[in-house]
Amino acid sequence: MKIKLVETGGIVPLNKEAEAETEWTKEECEHLLKLIASNTAGSAARDAISHSLIVNRKETPIDLSKLPAKYRTLFNQLLKDMHYMPR
Amino acid sequence: MCNHRHSYDPARCIIPPYISNKLAGSPDKKIAARAIKNAVETVKLRAKREFSGGLSDAQRALLQPTKPKSKTAKLNMQVYDMLHGTNPSAAKLVWDNGTLKGKSDKQVTNVIAAGTATWDFYYKLFGRNSVDNKGLLLRHFVHYSSKYNNAMWDGSEMVYGDGDGVIFGDFTADPDIIGHELTHGVTQYESNLAYHNQSGALNESLSDVFGIMVKQRMLNQDVKTANWLIGENVVRGSKYALRSMKAPGTAYVNHPQLGTDPQPASFDKYVKLPDTSSGDYGGVHINSGITNFAFYKAAFDMGGFAWEKAGRVWYAAMTDKTLQQEASFKDFRDLTIKQAGKIFGKNSLEQKAVTAAWKSAKV
Ligand SMILES: [Zn+2]
């Protein structure tokens, strides 16, 4: 299953992204997305950086601090591989 | 002097660069130092004369700073070192209201200088005591995470990263960035402009407007000597900055990683983007170029120091109780024109300058 991690926001509105091929099943992916989904609605933060995960063209805002330990290596690699997407 | 791109020293940077060059060329340091002092005073006086020339006594009286509401109000501020972590409860207090509690460094001194200057700016000029006007403790967190490319207001505090050292440098290097983040606090406690589409772009623009004035006041720059660049030390490379208020869209051009600054300068070029994080919530940091340009034009055409005329008008509009959370550019334009009339008189040159500035931005 192909996943794309997207980093957006900040005082400069730049978008970064990185992709990876995973062995996740549909169920595992749904379970993970439920666990790490973030809710920033009504947040008073300004210029904040956010992350989202795109799977099968569906984008889910996520909170990386909620990531279970077994996924950290994969996400750290994705963060390392990120490149800017100029507008 | 001020050519060091990745540090900010207000004591050194208050001297304009062309005067610094004079010092470098002088064989007698005493004479050169005196010449510099005189030149700085001359620049100050000339700027003052230019801006107050042609004003009536009544108008000049209006330009005096608003009387602070309380004589006992004082800065309440702390600086914490995140030690490259992301958990604020693990941060180390390094500076507490004038007392050094831990190891200081460039980032700590940068936020002390610009944080103090921002409080002083709002208090001395507008009688405002901190972001909430009730003396709220200002807490700055430096060295957030590792190579973090951002500065932000988290709803109650300021957070600054060190930058990756490749595309971005230290995010405390520009006082306009620190003033920008603190102004998000002011907006939050005033109209709380909704952070999307036009109201979000206004929110962003107000932070740039007051951030740039904090920097210009620290450096004693008038509207003509200022370069109107936001984050010129934050983006690495002498050709680059985060935003240009004077010429939106030119802060970085053909940058190898960032591409070209997408900010428009006029409303006919408004960029329609989705109201999502990847769409910058409808382009709040992009379309702010339009209202930034309107402020620049108004300030430039009125002359002198930006905070003495245009800044007063924008502050009055920002704190106007009729400013709605979902305000449009046109709503804010109308408020500034109304406030310019109230402060300087109906059909005054200042009110005409504000009206013309919005026309230049095609709002
Ligand atoms: Zn901002």
Image (spheres, helix red, strand yellow):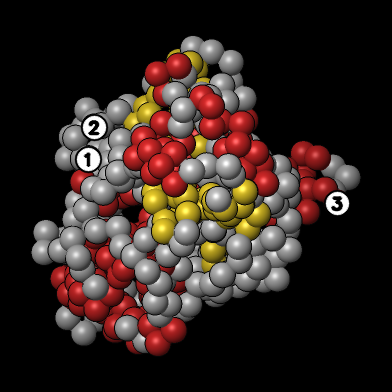
In what element is the residue under mark 1? loop
Look at mark 1 in the image and give the residue it sits on.
B132
Residue depicted at 49% across the width and 12% down the height = B101
- Tell whether B43 sits left or right of B166: left
Mark 1 residue type: Asp
Look at mark 2 in the image and give the residue it sits on.
B135
User: Gap between marks 2 and 3, in whole Å?
Assistant: 46 Å
- Marks counted in the figure total 3
The answer to the question of whether label 1 and label 2 lie on touching residues, with beta carbons closer than 8 A, is yes
Q: Earlier in the sequence, mark 1 or mark 3?
A: 3
Look at mark 3 in the image and give the residue it sits on.
B25
Q: Quadrant of the C terminus of chain B?
A: bottom left
Q: Is residue B301 above or below residue B139?
A: below
Q: Position of residue B91 (x, y in %)?
A: 46, 19
Label 2 CB-ligand 1 distance < 8 A: no
Mark 2 residue type: Gly
In what element is the residue under mark 3? helix
Q: Position of residue B246 (x, y in %)?
A: 52, 72
Q: Nearer the viewer, residue B329 or B227?
A: B329
Residue depicted at 44% across the width and 84% down the height = B269
Q: Quadrant of residue A31?
A: top left
The answer to the question of whether label 2 and label 3 lie on touching residues, with beta carbons closer than 8 A, is no
User: Gap between marks 1 and 3, in whole Å?
Assistant: 47 Å
- Give the farthest residue toward the right: B27
User: Gap between marks 1 and 2, in whole Å?
Assistant: 7 Å
